[in-house]
Image (cartoon, rainbow, N blue to C red):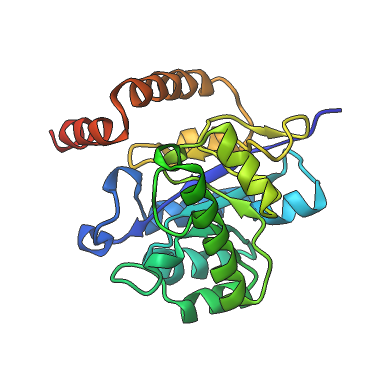
Amino acid sequence: MKSISPVFMFHALYNVASELYDADSHYAITVSEFEELVAHLVSNNIEITSLCKLVETESLNEKKVCFTFDDGHISNYESAVPILLKYNASADFFINPAYVGNKGYIDWDGLRSMHASGMSIQSHGHHHYYFDDLDTATIRKELELSKMTIEDNLGSEVSIFAPPGGRITPAVKDIAFDLGYSAIATSRPGYWNSLTGTKDIPRLAVLANTSSEEMYAWASTDRSGLYKIVAKYSITRIAKKILGNKLYDRLRSAALSE
C-alpha cells in the first residue's frame, strides 16, 4: 500500500516587516500564523517531523507532516525553532554556508544549537545559485563544499539537498547522489509518497498569501486544492525556461512590487 506525507516549505518568519532584512516577503509569513499552524496540527494528532527522519526511517504516513525551511534566515533560529520545540516538533533547515553569520542569517553557533536541539541542518548549495545556470564543475563544487562545510561545523552527516529556487536538472541530481546525498527536496508541488523515491521529493511552498485553511487541507492530504498549485507551477516552470532565470526574476520582482 502506498504511504504518503506532505512536506511543507517555509522561508522567513516575522513579527514586523523590518525583521525580514533582504528575505523575499512573498515567501514570508508571520510568527503568529506559523504558531497557529503548528498548534492546529499538534492538536489534531499530526506529528511534525523532519524530512531527514522520514528518509532515514521510511515511515511515511498521513499522520506525519514534514516541515522544511530554506535559506537559513535568522528568524528560523529566533522564532521557528522555539515554537517547534514548544510543541515537541522538528524540521529541516536548508542553508547556504557562504552566508552563515551575515546580516539576517543564522550564525554557526545558532546552527549548532539548533542541531543539538534535534533540528536537521541540510544543504541549499554553498551559495544561493540557480543550479540550472551552472556548469558541471561548479555544480560539483557547490554541492561538495556545502556538504563538507556543514558537516565540519556541526559534526553530523548532510544527506539532503534542496536546490535554490527549485531549479534542478537530471545532471544536478546525478552529481548530488554521486557526492553522497541520499535525497533531493524539490519545489515541485505535491505529496511525497513511498513510490516516488528520494530523487525528487515534492514540497508545498507556504507563501504570504497561503491561507490557514489551505495549509490545514495540505496537512490532511486533501488533493482538491492542489490542482491550481500544480498548474501554476507548470506555467512558471515553462516561463523560466523560455525567459531565463535573470529575466524571469526581474519580471517577477516588478509584478510583485505592483
Q: Nearer the viewer, residue 172 or 61?
A: 172
Q: Quadrant of the C terminus?
A: top left
Q: Residue at x 60, y 42 (%)?
A: 7
Q: Position of residue 96 (x, y in %)?
A: 44, 61
Q: Report if residue 65 is visible in the image.
A: no
Left or right, residue 138 beside residue 49: left
x 80%, y 46%: residue: 58
- Name which residue lies at 49% across and 55% down: 142
Residue 62, percent across and down? 72, 38
Q: Can you name the residue that lies furthest to the left here? A: 258
| The furthest residue to the front | 137
The quadrant of the rendering that contains the N terminus is top right
> Residue 29, percent across and down?
36, 50
Kindly tell me whether residue 179 is visible in this rendering.
yes
Q: Nearer the viewer, residue 192 or 85?
A: 192
Q: Going by the image, does 194 lie left or right of 203?
A: right
Instruction: Give the number of marks.
Output: 0
Q: Height in image: 59 above or below 96?
A: above
Q: Position of residue 116 (x, y in %)?
A: 63, 77
Q: Nearer the viewer, residue 139 or 237?
A: 139
Which residue sits furthest right? 1
